[in-house]
């Protein structure tokens, strides 16, 4: 009997479980998602003013709001994942903020294309402008 592939339900929660990240950073400016790992790592360093840290995930979105990339660092190296919505747009913070800190729950809502700013139970941390 052939095994069925694992469904991508709750992709945000699945990524959080596999990667075991302690912090999620939403990079709010639109990003050219043709960029690879090295360019995105450099962007994290430029925006946060420090090198990407182990156990942290960094989320980038395209201008249209239909795709995101997750860059995550663990003790073995760097992960890069892409998510695309078939319909709708990812909910993004207002323009002018450079980055947001997200909880794992907020990241899961973001990946699902849901308005994570309204549905989050825990209070959101405020944007920090660098």
Image: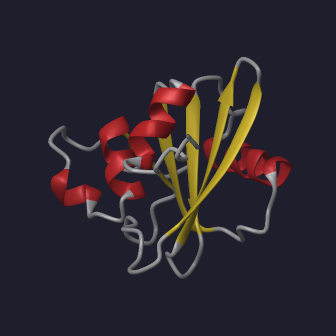
Q: Measured from the top left, where is residue 27 in percent x and y?
A: 55, 55
Between residues 86 and 110, which one lies in front from this camera angle?
Answer: 86
What number of labels is visible?
0
Colour pattern: secondary structure
Which quadrant would the N terminus be assigned to in this image? top right
Residue 106, position in %: x, y?
Answer: 32, 46
Name the side, left or right, on which 85 lies relative to 36.
left
Report x, y in % for residue 121.
14, 42
Residue that lies at the very extreme toward the front in this rendered image: 1
Q: Residue at x 30, y 40 (%)?
A: 105
Front one among 47 and 1: 1
User: What residue is drawn where x is 41% and y is 76%?
Assistant: 89
Q: Position of residue 38 (x, y in %)?
A: 85, 48
Residue 8 as seen in the image, left or right of residue 112: right
Q: Residue 126: in sight, yes or no?
A: no
Q: Is residue 58 above or below residue 30?
A: above
Looking at the image, the residue that sits furthest to the right is: 38
13 in relation to 88, above or below: above
Q: Residue at x 79, y 62 (%)?
A: 35
Dividing the picture into quadrants, the one containing residue 84 is bottom right
Q: Is residue 52 left or right of residue 22?
A: right
Quadrant of residue 33 within the rendered picture:
bottom right
Residue 41 in view: yes
- Residue at the extreme top of the image, as rendered: 75
Residue at x-position 50% and y-position 38%: 15
Note whether 46 is above or below 14 in the view shown: below
């Amino acid at each position: 009997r052939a095994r069925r592939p694992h469904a991508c339900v709750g992709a945000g929660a699945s990524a959080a479980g596999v990667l075991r990240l302690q912090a999620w950073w939403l990079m709010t400016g639109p990003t050219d998602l043709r960029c690879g790992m090295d360019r995105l790592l450099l962007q994290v360093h430029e925006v946060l003013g420090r090198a990407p840290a182990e156990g942290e995930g960094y989320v980038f979105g395209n201008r249209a709001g239909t795709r995101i990339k997750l860059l995550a660092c663990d003790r073995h190296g760097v992960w890069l994942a892409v998510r695309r919505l078939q319909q709708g747009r990812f909910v993004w913070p207002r323009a002018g903020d450079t980055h947001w800190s997200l909880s794992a729950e907020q990241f899961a809502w973001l990946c699902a294309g849901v308005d994570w700013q309204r549905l989050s139970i825990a209070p959101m941390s405020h944007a920090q402008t660098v």
